[in-house]
């Protein structure tokens, strides 16, 4: 490895750490934004700014804005799912804690996605997958405090966060096909464009305009961070870094997301992480590690890759 290559590797690794930190901190930013208006209205502004940011990135990168006509059904379905996820994201944050929600959703997303992929593939989990999924389900039970408090599922935004995880898992299956229709970035750009129109329709022009009277520097700063820094720039960097340092190494950095979500809410919102969130989060991370760990045997079968997506992914 040349000195220049090593330097580039270090740059990408540093960028990955910053990107994952941004993904985690987006939960804190979302909590702050949630007090300014309804989830529908906040989602509209976030989608609109994300769309504008992606248009600029595609223009600078000279990436075509065209996608195959065959991809339109998937793009429309993805728009509905990302709209549903974002609505549930903000709805949960209006009543729940950013740190707890960030840990819960980012841990459950890959577990639920993995279960769905096994069902679609119509195959039983291997022994390694079984223990990974069992550990993941245990993490979910602890995070939701189902055994200690049965009513906790319907309090503190947990039901919204759980539904958001389900929506994101289905979204992941749809967007996994995005590369078939052109650039994934272009697919995302048009997905956010449709979502912007949808949220404007459901929010209503009057409500959307009235929020501007309450918007201040804090609102615009967090909106810019959430939509442009986190969703557009950090996510785009993640995909670029994946092609440079490898998918396996890149995906390992996603384990930083639940930690940064808890850290951000602690620093900026004074939310002290609870014991069940810490224990459940650690178990969930261990579960995803087990599911992603490749067997060092020649007979090992291919396994579906699971990652802490996003969003917000790509959040």
Image (spheres, helix red, strand yellow):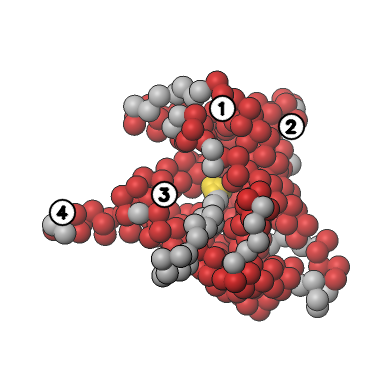
> Dividing the picture into quarters, in which one does residue 138 lie?
bottom right
Residue 230 visible in the picture = yes
Judge left or right: residue 104 versus residue 311: right
Residue behind mark 1:
71
Q: Find the distance from the CA under tag 2 to the CA under tag 1.
A: 27 Å
Q: Position of residue 81 (x, y in %)?
A: 67, 39
Residue 196 visible in the picture = no
Residue behind mark 3:
238
* Mark closer to the chain start, 2 or 4: 4
Judge left or right: residue 307 versus residue 171: left
Q: Residue furthest front?
A: 299
Q: Where is residue 261 in the image (x, y as percent from the top left)?
A: 56, 62
Q: Which of the two discs, 3 and 2, sits closer to the camera? A: 3
Residue behind mark 4:
4
Say what secondary structure mark 2 lies in: helix
Residue behind mark 2:
203
Q: Find the distance from the CA under tag 4 to the CA under tag 1.
A: 39 Å
Q: Find the distance from the CA under tag 2 to the CA under tag 4.
A: 50 Å
Residue at 34 percent across and 47 percent down: it is 243
Q: Nearer the viewer, residue 237 or 141?
A: 141
């Amino acid at each position: 490895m040349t000195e220049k290559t090593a330097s580039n590797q270090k740059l990408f690794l540093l960028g990955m750490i910053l990107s994952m930190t941004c993904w985690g901190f987006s939960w804190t930013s979302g909590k702050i934004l949630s007090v300014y208006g309804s989830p529908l209205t906040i989602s509209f502004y976030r989608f609109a700014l994300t769309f504008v940011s992606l248009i600029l990135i595609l223009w600078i990168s000279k990436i075509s804005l065209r996608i195959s006509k065959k991809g339109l059904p998937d793009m429309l379905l993805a728009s509905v799912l990302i709209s549903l996820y974002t609505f549930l994201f903000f709805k949960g944050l209006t009543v729940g804690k950013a740190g707890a929600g960030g840990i819960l959703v980012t841990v459950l997303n890959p577990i639920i996605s993995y279960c769905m992929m096994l069902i679609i593939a119509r195959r039983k989990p291997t022994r390694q997958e079984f223990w990974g999924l069992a550990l993941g389900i245990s993490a979910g039970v602890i995070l939701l405090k189902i055994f200690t408090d049965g009513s906790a599922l319907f309090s503190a935004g947990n039901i919204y966060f759980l539904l958001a995880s389900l929506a994101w898992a289905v979204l992941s299956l749809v967007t996994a096909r995005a590369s078939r229709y052109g650039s994934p970035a272009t697919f995302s750009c048009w997905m956010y464009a449709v979502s912007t129109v949808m949220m404007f329709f459901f929010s209503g022009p009057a409500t959307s305009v009235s929020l501007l009277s309450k918007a201040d520097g804090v609102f615009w700063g967090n909106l810019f961070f959430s939509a442009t820094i986190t969703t557009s720039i950090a996510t785009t960097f993640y995909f670029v870094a994946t092609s440079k340092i490898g998918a396996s190494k890149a995906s390992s950095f996603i384990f930083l997301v639940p930690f940064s979500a808890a850290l951000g809410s602690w620093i900026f919102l004074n939310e002290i992480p609870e014991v069940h969130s810490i224990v459940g989060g650690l178990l969930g991370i261990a579960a995803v590690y087990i599911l992603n760990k490749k067997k060092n045997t020649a007979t090992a079968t291919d396994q579906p890759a699971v990652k802490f997506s996003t969003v917000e992914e790509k959040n």
